[in-house]
Image (spheres, rainbow, N blue to C red):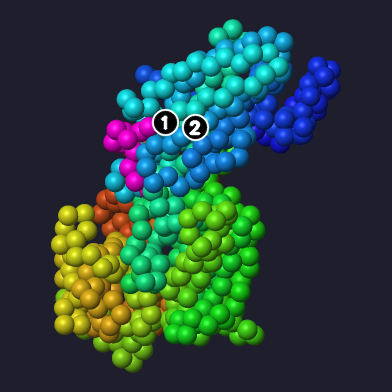
Amino acid sequence: MAAPQVTGATAILKQYIKAKNIQTDNSSEFIKLLLMNTATPLKDEGIFEDIPYFVRQQGSGALNIENALKTTVVVRAQGTNDNIADGKLELKELKDKRFDVRLSLENFGDSTKSYDINSVALYEPTDGTYRLQRSEILHSNESNISREISVEAHSSANIDFTMDYSDAENLEEDNFIEGFISLRDKDGISNLNIPFLGFYGDWGKQRAIDAFQLPEIGSEKRNVQFFVNKNAGVSSSMLGTSMMLKLPLYNNEIYFSPNSKYYPDVAARIAPLRNMEQVEYSILDAKTEETLRVLGVSKQVRKLSRLSVNKSFKFMSESVWDGKIGEGIAEDGAEYIYCIKAKLNTNNVGGNGEQVYKFPVRVDSMAPNLSTANEVQVNDIDGNMKEIVFNVHDKGIGIENVYLQSIRYAQDDKADTSIRYGKSFVIRFQDEPVKDGKELVKVEDGKLNIPVEAVPDSPTARGEVYVYTNGYRNSDIEVHCPYFADTSDLIIDAVDYMDNKSRTTLSDVREGNYNQINFLNFFDYISNKNASVYVNDIKLDDMTYSLIEKEAVIRIKLADEESHLHKLTLKHDNIEENIIFG
């Protein structure tokens, strides 16, 4: 029930109680009871039956002021683990699939009222690994209560019974049991409801925060209940950046790099499964577990499974660690513990009221080791095909990609150092031996030999190859990579999973550069118009043509005699010259 509506309804009921001269010991408690009794449980409309949403989601249901003004009876509930007579039945921790109920009806009207008593119980099904986040009706022969009760005018009446779900196989241990006890008015004027909620199993074992993308220190990885994207394996609880970019994970350790572009900090988003008075976030020394820094505290964190909550997670702004310890930055390569300490709202039920979650976090700001220009070998294979031999080694999270990029300078004498990029080739490392059903080239005995047939053999074609690290992710790798050299200069970039980068620039990989002719409107105004372009009598099927010579004969053939060139512009060395215009 939303707060503004409740406030308005409360004002109306105060006037109603005064006008009807209803005698109450505590008008505020009476109005609260009246609103809870007469609320309408919300249901998900199904094909075969309408299923109420969880009590955890909706409480008593939607406010129904019309119903509240019609009823002349209120009902209070007590039962197993709940000695407080009010508008709800809080069963807390149940050791068995059964519980006792006492309903106490108070009639403040002028006539006898009679009700049929029924109930609907709900459980949350699982697929064996996580909860499906939808309610299902719990069917049980033992629990099919159908009773009657009457209460005379200006008097009270009680009824006691047991709700037994012992034969309900779908109710597995460590699951919620919840639902509604309904009192249907035989006069058809105003129906009443009592929500009930309990936990069948050991409530003390239930974690307050859903599982993260890695196991907690000293524990097995828990099954995830809430996902942002189940197919992609993205859990709702996650350690990521303050922009909620997923942090790299390796060997069950989270990595980040303070002051980096993509992974500069660590923050928590959580899927709360239980209400928490507060959640504290801190950084501990990995060896001594001494607290090095308290990041912040979140107060009164509410659990999920409420209708007003659309997301399956909450970003905790107080949890951000920017990598600072005291006045300095965390030591590079060092391991720390990211600690989450939750103080629960237990009311002395299940556990000691505190849960601690610890995760290993490692700092990695060091770029990979890459051979210098003097250490790289360039060997001839055949004509323009070269073998580039170099070593790469990342001692942190490991190498992700190596890029080979042809470059040329704006002027041959490099007086103008502006770079023009040519073709490229990418070596992508992964820890699995197979991709898309194909076995990958792999590192063996510390060497990676990429076959010639895996590399494009033209001056314009770009390419990539996936390789299997084979246990050498953090070890020195000697790379032998064929490369069709289209320019005399070449860049090698080694990049790890943190985007830390090392670069080596080579000169004189080959003598002279290939020259490129680019037809910028090839697809829009040439091939789409059934025209053809020839360079040195070779018909093009792409917008780019490369040649070692500095001169070429270009011939453009139009589709028919009625076609004509409206404009032809030649751009060379940043100078445009209109050959045909108008």
Pick whichever, 18 or 354, lies toward us.
18
Queried whether the magenta region covers residue 549, the answer comes back as: no
Identify the residue shown where x is 37% and y is 19%. Answer: 48
Q: Can you give x and y, in whole percent of width and height, for residue 243 in the image?
A: 56, 60
Question: In the image, 477: left or right of 565?
Answer: left
In this view, which residue lies farthest toward the top? 187
Disc 1 from disc 2: Cα separation: 7 Å
In this view, which residue lies farthest toward the bottom? 374
Residue 507 visible, this angle: no
Please name the residue that numbered disc 1 is placed on: 163
Q: Can you give x and y, in whole percent of width and height, for residue 240 in the image?
A: 49, 63
Please name the residue that numbered disc 2 is placed on: 101
Identify the residue shown where x is 46% and y is 24%. Answer: 119
Is 545 rendered above or below residue 1? below
Query: How crowded is the residue under tag 1: few (<14 C-alpha within 10 Å), some, or many (20+)?
Result: some
Q: Main secondary structure of the magenta part?
A: loop
In the rendered view of the protein, which quadrant contains the C terminus? Answer: top right
Q: Amino acid at mark 2?
A: Val
Identify the residue shown where x is 28% and y is 83%. Answer: 475
Q: Amino acid at mark 1?
A: Met
The span picked out in magenta is 164-175
Pick whichever, 198 or 433, lies toward us.
198
Query: How crowded is the residue under tag 2: few (<14 C-alpha within 10 Å), some, or many (20+)?
Result: some
Q: Can you give x and y, in whole percent of width and height, for residue 465 in the image?
A: 25, 65
Pick whichever, 54 or 145, lies toward us.
145
Question: In the image, 43: left or right of 463?
Answer: right
Q: Are marks 1 and 2 in contact (CB under 8 Å)?
A: yes
In the rendered view of the protein, which quadrant contains the N terminus? Answer: top right
